[in-house]
Amino acid sequence: MKSEIKSRYQQNSKGVLLPYRLVETCYEQGNDKSLTLFVKLKRVHRNGVFYNASARSIAKVTGISHATVNTHLKKLASLGLVRYIKGKNGVQQLQLVGYRQYTKAWGRELVFIEYGSKKEINARIKAQIAIRHIKTQEYNIGRKQGRNRKWGMIVESPINYASLSDRNLAEVMGVSNCTANRMKSEWSELGLITVRPMWSIIQTGVSESHYKKAKAFGAIPSHAVFERNRKRILIRMADAVSIGIDSSYKYVPNTWVPPMVIQGYNSTPK
């Protein structure tokens, strides 16, 4: 227990441990921005008490407008994360509910939200929904690989990769494909996920003029691209994804290149 408390306080200097169920509920209810304020408030006072609290004073230390602060505080109060108390001199104080209280209410399956700007914190909160989706894929892949090892089989297939296409992420997050693409870019920049495009070869040994003619006549998909240095036409199959900045994959041989798939491109081939 003491080691757990020590670890928790060390982490509190860099961010906040929050129950995943709380994060998920806030996102589903549209309260992720209110939770963002809670994380910012946690950084201001480690003891969780704001003396002589007012919307303007809190707005000043968090960089959020006082009108917005009032709205968010009401939502946080309804979630049981903040409460108002009277101090010895009768002045109103804002108290942030502590780790023990909110884990008792929301469970001990925790995620770590690192401090940063308002935009960065909000992105990290939203990313937890996608990260859970990726972990579920990895778990299912692990089970399949385990069964294959049991029977002495080595099955190497693109389905061994956790994937996160714009369409798939849009369904998970309940947003448009365009917004999903922007989210992936933000999370990649923050080091929360690593996205690796997977390309399939359509034709090899062709000229650029052949590629342009085939595209003009509709012989190849409109989103196909031409790789000049290798003289081949490619089409993007999917986005393989891993959690964090380490782009290695837990359940797939790192040296394996799937048939008809090229790995390692950081951007669209030119």
Image: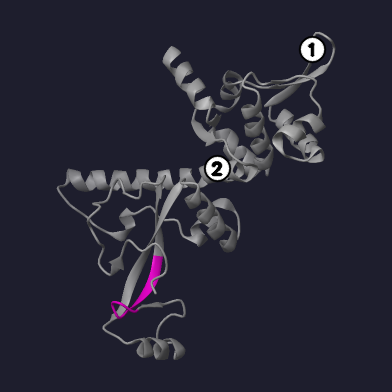
Figure label count: 2
Amino acid type at circle 2 is Arg
According to the picture, the residue beneath numbered tag 1 turns out to be 87
According to the picture, the residue beneath numbered tag 2 turns out to be 124
Amino acid type at circle 1 is Gly
User: What's the magenta region?
Assistant: 228-237
> Foreground residue, 218 or 36?
36
Left or right, residue 243 beside residue 127: left
Residue 89 shows in the view? yes
Work out whether 107 lies above or below 147. Answer: above
> Foreground residue, 66 or 27?
66
Name the residue located 76 percent from the left edge and 34 percent from the top edge.
60
Left or right, residue 269 beside residue 88: left
Cα separation, mark 2 vs mark 1, equals 34 Å
Name the residue located 62 percent from the left edge and 41 percent from the top edge.
117
> What percent of the width, then of the height, locates residue 118?
64, 42
The residue tagged with tag 2: helix, strand or loop? Answer: helix
> Foreground residue, 237 or 12?
12
Q: Which mark is residue 242?
A: none
Q: Is residue 266 magenta?
A: no
> What percent of the width, then of the height, locates residue 80?
69, 26
Q: Mark 2 Cα within 10 Å, few/some/many (few <14, many 20+)?
A: many
Left or right, residue 231 beside residue 78: left
Return the disc, 2 or 1, that comes first in the chain's sequence.
1
The residue tagged with tag 1: helix, strand or loop? Answer: loop
Q: Residue furthest top?
A: 88
Name the residue located 54 percent from the left edge and 52 percent from the top edge.
186
> What percent of the width, then of the height, locates residue 239?
41, 60
Name the residue located 31 percent from the left edge and 60 percent from the top edge.
158
